[in-house]
Image (tube, rainbow, N blue to C red):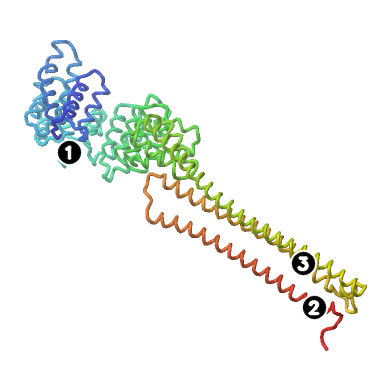
Amino acid sequence: METVTSDHSLHSATSLFRALVGDRLRDKYKAVEALGDPGLGVDAATLRGLLVRAINEDFCVGKEDELEDSSIAFTRSWLLNALARVSRDDSEASDLVVKHLDKNHETNGWARYWALEGLITGKNPKLDLIARNVAAVEDDPIISMLAIAYLGSLKDAKAIRKVRDGLAHPETQWYVLRALRVVSLPATVADIISIVDAAAYRDETYDAIMALGIVPSQSSHAETAAQSLSGCIVKLRGSPWKDGMRIGAISGLGKLKVESSAPVLLEELADHNPGVVREAARSMEHILGLNVAISRIVEAAAKGGSSGIDAFGRALRWLNREATAEELGALMLSGAEKQREAARMLLSELGGAVAFEKLRARTDAMKQYTDVLEKAEQGVRSLFDRTIREAQNGFQLAVIMDAMVFALGILLLVGSSVYALVKGGDLSSWAGVGVSGGVGVLGVLYGTLVAKPRRQVRESVDHLMRLKIMFLAYLRRLHQADQAYTRRMLDDKLLSIQEVEWFSEVVANIMDSTMEHTEEERGRGRRQNQHVRARANDAVPAALVEGTGVRAGP
């Protein structure tokens, strides 16, 4: 362990020491686990000094008999284990641990066991010689078998044979399994699996489960070991008195890191036992990584509905709260609607200041997003209203002009009829009713001065309405693209150049499509006007010929 001299590292060292000599067993376990965490920044020299002094003075050999307090030997076991783990580069500390491996000095068997376990876990450089000496002289089977198992890990064929023989006999099986909880031997994995698959409620099964959990994750036996532990978990469900064994199996899956075991752990997250839920959540994180594990939990919560939100919310509290809140916040912005809603509900269940800030930030972002859209909506609608007013003004001007032409036509009709009566005393020649019949001049004047303006008014109204519909459709499509882009901008992941280009292309396609429809509308208007003019041009000469009473042709 690296020696650090900062105030924080000194404080960490004293905190770990107080936990080891304290009365709470949970604190002792956490302190030993923390010894292997390089990020904790413990001052190793200070910790070793505290441990050596405590082992030699307050918790020395014989003190428990002097004070008639068996807890002194129990605490000394923890202190020796911790000292053995951090004594790799300190010969004085290593010598003290080895001294306590001598049964003539250390009379407590568990103290000797934990001293040797600490040397194996801490990978002491002198361990090979130490293990051979212990295996040769130790008569306590739990200690000697641990030394033999370590020698077996060094490819010692004789030691491996002893371990396998001991595993096959009921009277020595537990001692071997206890040793295999510390040292993993590939040659024994198949035998251990057979014990775990039976799932009998006894100490040997628990130790076999723990032994499978330390199989190296890169080993060829990892997949088989994970399958055995997964099956054992299923068999142990529904028996609360077996939860300790089930928790051990769940923890083992987390160490094996076999991804196919994740669905089994996901089911354990809904268990009523908090210990089971805690280990299942942490094991999923070890196997899948935090982000993927949270995604799986959100998917399961979305499928299960509101009934699973509470259970999965409790499970997420065992993970890193800040990182979990960040990932849930990101999942609120992507995926299917049910998954986004599940992520939001899980974030609210997670609680804490980080989750609250994330939800508030989300709410503020959505409010800002809504305000921006509202302002954009007002601006576009103002532009649209101004355009419509301009069109209405043009339409009104056209109506006024058509009305003037209509009135002028009526005046001309009245004037011409009066003129015809005054001059000829008869309206037959004015109306064009002769031998050939036909609409005559009256029909031409009505079509030109009355019917045509009315048709133009109707066509102008239709054209204006079509333009309005096209503009509203353009506005809606543009807003949909804007909403998608804004949602993507609110995501934690940065926008790539390809995504920006894709959104730009979407907007361009919307504009091009609208312009094409506009051009089609203009073309249709031109074709209608040409058709009307052609009909008028064809009708006027014929009417005029018929009105004069002269037949066309020879």
Q: Nearer the viewer, mark 1 or mark 2?
A: 2
Q: Measure how far apart labels 1 and 2 are at the Cα level.
A: 119 Å
Labelled disc at residue 449:
3
Q: Nearer the viewer, mark 3 or mark 1?
A: 3
Tell me, yes or no, whether the two marked residues, 3 and 1, touch with CB atoms within 8 Å. no
Percent coordinates x, y for residue 500 in the rendering = 41, 54
Residue indicated by mark 2 = 542
Percent coordinates x, y for residue 536 in the rendering = 74, 73
Is residue 549 shown left or right of residue 407?
Answer: right
Residue indicated by mark 1 = 152
Up the image or down, 341 lies above or below 542; here it is: above
Percent coordinates x, y for residue 243 in the rendering = 37, 27
Please name the amino acid that badge 1 sits on: Gly
**Observer-nearest residue: 179 or 80?**
80
Q: Nearer the viewer, mark 2 or mark 3?
A: 3
Asked whether residue 443 appears in the rendered view, the answer is: yes
Density class for disc 2 (Cα within 10 Å; few <14, some 14-19, many ≥20) is some
User: What is the count of numbered marks?
Assistant: 3
Q: Secondary structure at mark 1?
A: helix
For marks 2 and 3, the one nearer the N-term is: 3
Please name the amino acid that badge 2 sits on: Ala
Density class for disc 3 (Cα within 10 Å; few <14, some 14-19, many ≥20) is many
Q: Residue at x 24, y 18 (%)?
A: 23
